[in-house]
Amino acid sequence: MSTGEARPEVDLSALPSIVEMLPHRPPMVLIDAVTAFDFDTITCTRRIRADEPYVDDGKVPAAVAIEYIAQTVATQRGLDGLLRGLPVSRGVLAACRSLDLHVADFAVGDELTIRAENLGQMAHIASFRGIVERGGEVVAEGIIQVAEIQGDLGPGEPPG
């Protein structure tokens, strides 16, 4: 979604921490670092650890890729706002239009690369294409929509 406006070069070392971008707190923060960012796309990494949620007998079901993609998108949205001088907005996963899983699971120790590309936005709904790679191989990909919400969600409160 290019707007044609000049965009500043992003110094990755000066970016806020992932925890500052996400409404989650450890152990539910499932993104480790931002490795590339250009306002329309973001690339993050995740090394799967034995003590994290969803690990069972050394493996994580591949369906958890949707959460890796969603957290990567949330990080992109937060960084985009901050770098434009706006407050970090909160959002929710509104829809998963597609999710293709090319493996059954991930293993403890796997290093994942998660990329998300902004496909467009209408009002408070944005669409993103997400790709999860392991060792250079695409292991999951999907298209999600996220909705920006006003205010904070309390425990058990529905969005909006």
Image: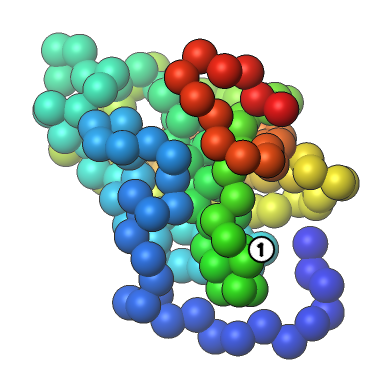
Residue 77 place in picture, x, y as percent: 59, 54
Q: Which residue is pictured at 76% across the width and 51% down the height?
A: 119
Name the residue nearer the viewer: 108 or 102: 108
Name the residue nearer the viewer: 119 or 150: 150
Give the mark count.
1
Quarter occupied by the N terminus: bottom right
Name the residue nearer the viewer: 52 or 99: 52
Relative to 29, is 99 on the left or the right? right
Q: Which residue is pictured at 12% across the width and 28% down the height?
A: 50
Q: Which residue is mark 1?
A: 40
Residue 149 place in picture, x, y as percent: 68, 38
**SS class of the residue under badge 1?**
loop
Quarter of the rendering containing residue 18? bottom left
Work out whether 104 lies above or below 124. Answer: above
Q: Looking at numbered disc 1 in the image, what kind of residue is underneath it?
A: Asp
Relative to 4, is 153 on the left or the right? left
Relative to 48, is 4 on the left or the right? right
Relative to 71, is 109 on the left or the right? left
Q: Which residue is pictured at 61% across the width and 32% down the height?
A: 92
Work out whether 61 lies above or below 28. Answer: above
